[in-house]
């Protein structure tokens, strides 16, 4: 059944966004401009388009769901009601807290081991010859295929969930860090050699400091992947967590709650990613000055 009030409301939001888009982009002939060649900060309205872009997605979603053309698609308002209800009862907060703890532990373990191994394998011949062949082999094995094996060794308790996230990330972190070192400007190495640095001095004083900004980007990318493996871990044998909430909601056809759980994933991911970006710009100011960003 068509919800006329919601349908008209979402139609109005979509019309406003289209009008705003026309004024900012089409009228100024910015639709084909390249980001790298455009001083977009001097154009008014681009920030408004940036921050209001989620409303375009919500408007389209709202039109589809409120039209009644597709079944089992709740409207954004229904999902918001479920999100507020789950939050007010404390259920969503508790489930999110458990999931964040699992992701944090698995991600930190993979990072603490993967980053040093990747830096060493990208710098020293012996480490490269020993690590990269095995790592490349393991990296092509789907991480979810380890789940059955990990259950045998760890059961379905917390250690199993940490292990799923750890094994899902470690091999990709190592390879991506190796690639970061391989892409290092060789002029830095040449300057270190002419300055009389030993191989270990080159590693500690040139390679590691120069690679840290991009290694941080590697960690940002893999943090998002950690949430993917968390869901795979929580669907099997978990009694708490956002993945468990989504699985239970699907089983009992609580579709709005299912969408609310997915929304919680998105919010946590966005906040964590932006936080890492802010920390990166604070730690590596020289890097962003060099990039003029």
Image (spheres, rainbow, N blue to C red):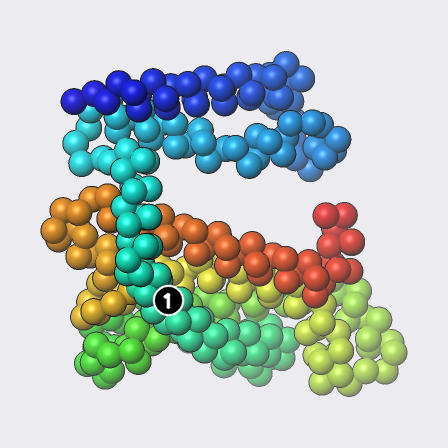
Q: As rendered, which of 271 and 37 lies closer to the eye?
A: 271
Q: Residue furthest front?
A: 88
Residue 147 visible in this rendered orientation of the protein: yes
Position of residue 131 measured from the top left corner of the image (x, y, whole percent):
49, 78
x then y, percent, for residue 255: 20, 44
**Relative image position of residue 248 (x, y in whole percent):** 17, 57
* Residues packed near mark 1 inside 10 Å, few (<14), some (14 to 19) or many (20 plus): some
Q: Nearer the viewer, residue 142 or 75?
A: 75
Quadrant hosting residue 29 = top right
Q: How many marks?
A: 1
Quick one: 96 or 173, which is closer to the camera?
A: 96
Q: Is residue 121 visible?
A: no
Residue pictured at 24% horizontal, 48% vertical: 257
Q: Quadrant of the N terminus?
A: top left
Residue sticking out furthest to the top: 27
User: What percent of the width, then of the height, locates residue 233?
Assistant: 27, 67
Q: Relative to 271, does residue 34 appear above or below in the rendering?
A: above
The outermost residue toward the right is 195
Left or right of residue 33: residue 85: left
Left or right position of 234 against 137: left
Query: Which quadrant of the figure has residue 70?
Result: top left
267 lies above or below 10: below
Please give the name of the residue rendered at 56% of the width and 54% of the height, measured from the top-left corner.
Answer: 274
Residue labelled with disc 1: 97
Residue at image location 20% in from the left, 69% down from the top:
239
Using the rendered view, name the quadrant where residue 119 is placed.
bottom right
Q: Residue at x 25, y 67 (%)?
A: 240
User: Tag 1, which secondary structure?
Assistant: helix
User: Does 113 appear above or below 287?
Assistant: below
């Amino acid at each position: 059944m068509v919800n006329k009030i919601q349908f008209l409301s979402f139609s109005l939001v979509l019309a406003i966004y289209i009008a705003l888009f026309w004024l900012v982009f089409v009228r100024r002939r910015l639709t084909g401009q390249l980001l790298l060649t455009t001083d977009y900060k001097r154009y008014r309205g681009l920030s408004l388009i940036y921050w209001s872009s989620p409303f375009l997605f919500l408007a389209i979603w709202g039109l589809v769901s409120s039209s009644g053309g597709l079944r089992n698609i709740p409207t954004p308002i229904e999902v918001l009601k479920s999100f507020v209800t789950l939050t007010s009862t404390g259920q969503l907060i508790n489930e999110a807290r458990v999931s964040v703890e699992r992701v944090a532990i698995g991600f930190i373990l993979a990072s603490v081991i993967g980053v040093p191994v990747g830096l060493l394998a990208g710098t020293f011949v012996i480490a490269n010859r020993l690590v990269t062949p095995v790592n490349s082999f393991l990296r092509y094995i789907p991480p979810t295929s380890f789940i059955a094996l990990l259950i045998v060794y760890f059961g379905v308790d917390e250690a199993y969930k940490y292990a799923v996230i750890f094994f899902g990330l470690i091999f990709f972190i190592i390879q991506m860090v190796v690639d970061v070192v391989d892409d290092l400007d060789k002029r830095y190495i040449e300057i270190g050699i002419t300055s009389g640095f030993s191989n270990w001095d080159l590693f500690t004083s040139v390679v590691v400091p120069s690679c840290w900004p991009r290694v941080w980007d590697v960690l940002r990318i893999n943090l998002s992947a950690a949430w993917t493996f968390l869901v795979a871990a929580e669907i099997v044998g978990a009694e708490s967590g956002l993945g468990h909430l989504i699985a239970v909601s699907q089983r009992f056809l609580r579709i709005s709650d299912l969408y609310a759980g997915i929304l919680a994933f998105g919010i946590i991911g966005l906040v964590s990613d932006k936080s890492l970006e802010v920390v990166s710009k604070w730690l590596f100011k020289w890097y962003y000055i060099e990039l003029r960003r």
